[in-house]
Amino acid sequence: MRNALRFLWNATRGNRFRPWRSDYLRWRIETYSGREAKTIGAGDFFRFVWQEKGQLIRFLHWAGRLDDGK
């Protein structure tokens, strides 16, 4: 869990309370979904997170395992 929070903290740098404005997260959503990054707003961001929550949780677990070296 700590690694997942660390990833989210780093991914939202500069936009901690507005993650939909994070260039990194918008870029990741663009590469995953094909939606153009500059058109992603708060509603689109939260809709994406809700629809893909299972994949996002698996990604955070994977990222945590990489960080731990397991």
Image: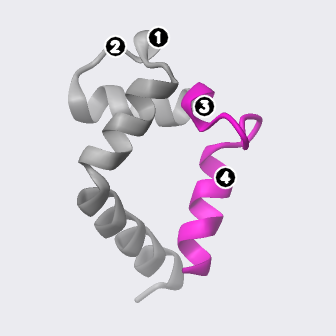
The answer to which of 20 and 37 lies nearer the viewer is 20
Amino acid residing under circle 1:
Lys
Disc 3 designates what residue? 22
- Mark found first going from the N terminus, 4 or 2: 4
- Mark found first going from the N terminus, 3 or 2: 3
Relative height, residue 61 to residue 12 (above, below): below
Q: Does 2 lie within the magenta span?
A: yes
Q: CA distance from mark 1 to mark 2?
A: 6 Å
Which secondary structure, mark 3? loop
Q: Quadrant of residue 55?
A: bottom left
Q: CA distance from mark 3 to mark 4?
A: 10 Å
Disc 2 designates what residue? 36
Image depth: mark 1 or mark 4 in front: 1
- Categorize mark 2 by other alpha carbons within 10 Å: few (<14), some (14-19), many (20+): few
Disc 4 designates what residue? 10
| Circles 3 and 2: CB atoms closer than 8 Å | no
